[in-house]
Amino acid sequence: MLSAVGNGFVTVLRRMGSRTVTIIGWLGYATRFAVAVVQKSPAAFSRLSLTLREIYFSGVLSLVIILVSGLFVGMVLALQGYDVLQRYGAAESLGVLVALSLVRELGPVVSGLLFASRAGSAITAEIGLMKATEQLSAMEMMAVDPLARVVAPRFWGGIISMPLLAALFSTLGIFGAYLVGVKLIGIDAGAFWSNMQAGVDFRYDIVNGIIKSVVFGIAVSMLAVFEGYDAKPTAEGVSTATTRTVVESSLAILGLDFVLTVFMFRGVG
Amino acid sequence: MNLNRSTLDLWVGVFVALGIGAILFLALKVGNLIDFASAPGYRLQARFDNIGGLKSRAPVKAAGVVVGRVESIKLDSATYQAVVTLRIEPGYQFTKDTIASILTSGLLGDVYIGLDPGGDPQMLADGGTVSKTQSGIVLEKLIGQFLFDKAAQGGAPK
């Protein structure tokens, strides 16, 4: 009786230990992969056409969803913000409310989430399928480094696209808020813009927002290429890896956003 | 991939140009690094002892209708008065005895300038000065005044 409990306890301990060792080993592998990708990055710029192609796939093809989402997020933000602000007779502050929420938070975060599901998943699926069909092994046999030829251009394409997409998202959002607030509801256009310009600081708000989007771009692109490279070379493995990319990227964006916000905007009312 | 190189380059170029344009828009129009200005209309000046929370580009209203904007606010270092330049839209005329007052829409709302025309037959022209002004209300001063009055009342012998 007692020995059965003891055996069960030992089994649980063993499992925990084995899981811990696996996770730490995975972390080490992921770090080694990240360092290798950064080392091979010059290849992404010495053959610029490869990176341009990736900017086309992850940036240009994400434009439509980013622009439409930005417009609608801005319009909804204006409607909801106006509903609350007009109770306090401060409807003119709508401009600064919308601009600050978009530039500081929603622009980088929502476009990051969209980017992860639109472009990150595609990158993982592509690299995973290349691995499953042994294209990566074939490249290695022909003395072509797949990290330099396949992974690095996708990584840099994502990093370059992400801040541009976030800036476009914020711009379209502000335009949407202008349409709803000024054209539809009838807030004074001058008050809308002047409040915004008085309340938004270039260095403090806009530059911090761009820094956020660059960090999210690095995180999403790195996770996407890693999951693709690490995928089991089967159909199921590729689909699992694609799902993991979206889930992990979204969690990474939200977690990093909290940490960055604590550092950037601490103690601001 | 059936996109040839030049089409791809074009699209990436359009994307990057749009993105940089968006960053510029955020910096210039939203963050206000540069002033986009110069609309038609004529200018009036008004001197106030205290402008309260008035900002440049605040609306100028007459009878609640927006008739212009605050163009600039400066301090006259000789009289220590605020010199506010108003740009009035063309087509609106105001009498020489117009009173300009600094008002607030709602308790927390935007600060604006209200113009109350009088009965003078002569009209203000471009570059004219609104001579009768009423300063903005500074809430702290008002509360201070109120407390001071209360204290004076309470301290007075009955």
Image (tube, grey):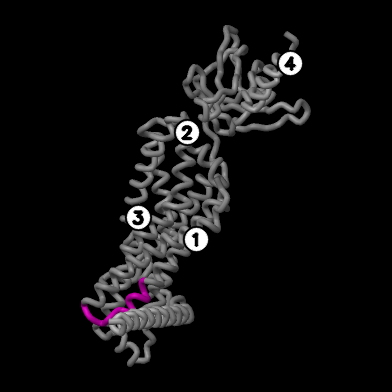
> Which mark is drawn over residue A92?
2
Q: Name the residue under label 1.
A: A259
Q: Mark 4 lies on which chain?
A: B
Seen at 40% across and 44% down, the residue is A175
Query: Is residue A244 shown to the viewer in this render?
Result: yes
Q: Name the residue under label 3.
A: A66
CA gap between label 2 and label 4 equals: 44 Å
Q: Position of residue A149 (x, y in %)?
A: 38, 81
Q: Nearer the viewer, mark 2 or mark 4?
A: 4
Q: Which type of secondary structure does the marked residue at label 1 adopt?
A: helix
Mark earlier in primary sequence (3, 2): 3
User: Hey, what amino acid is under mark 4?
Assistant: Gly
Q: Which chain carries label 1?
A: A
Per the picture, the main secondary structure of the magenta-coloured stretch is: helix
Q: In this view, does A161 lie to the left or right of B94?
A: left
Neighbour tally class for label 2: few under 14, some 14-19, many 20 plus, Cα within 10 Å: many
Q: Which type of secondary structure does the marked residue at label 2 adopt?
A: helix
Q: In which quarter of the image is residue A135?
A: bottom left
Q: Residue furthest left?
A: A235
> Which mark is drawn over residue B96?
none
User: Hey, what amino acid is under mark 1?
Assistant: Val
Residues in magenta, as a range: A224-235
Q: Which residue lies furthest to the right in this view?
A: B78
Q: Which chain carries label 2?
A: A
CA gap between label 1 and label 3 equals: 24 Å
Q: Which of marks 3 and 2 is in front?
A: 2
Q: Position of residue B20 (x, y in %)?
A: 47, 57
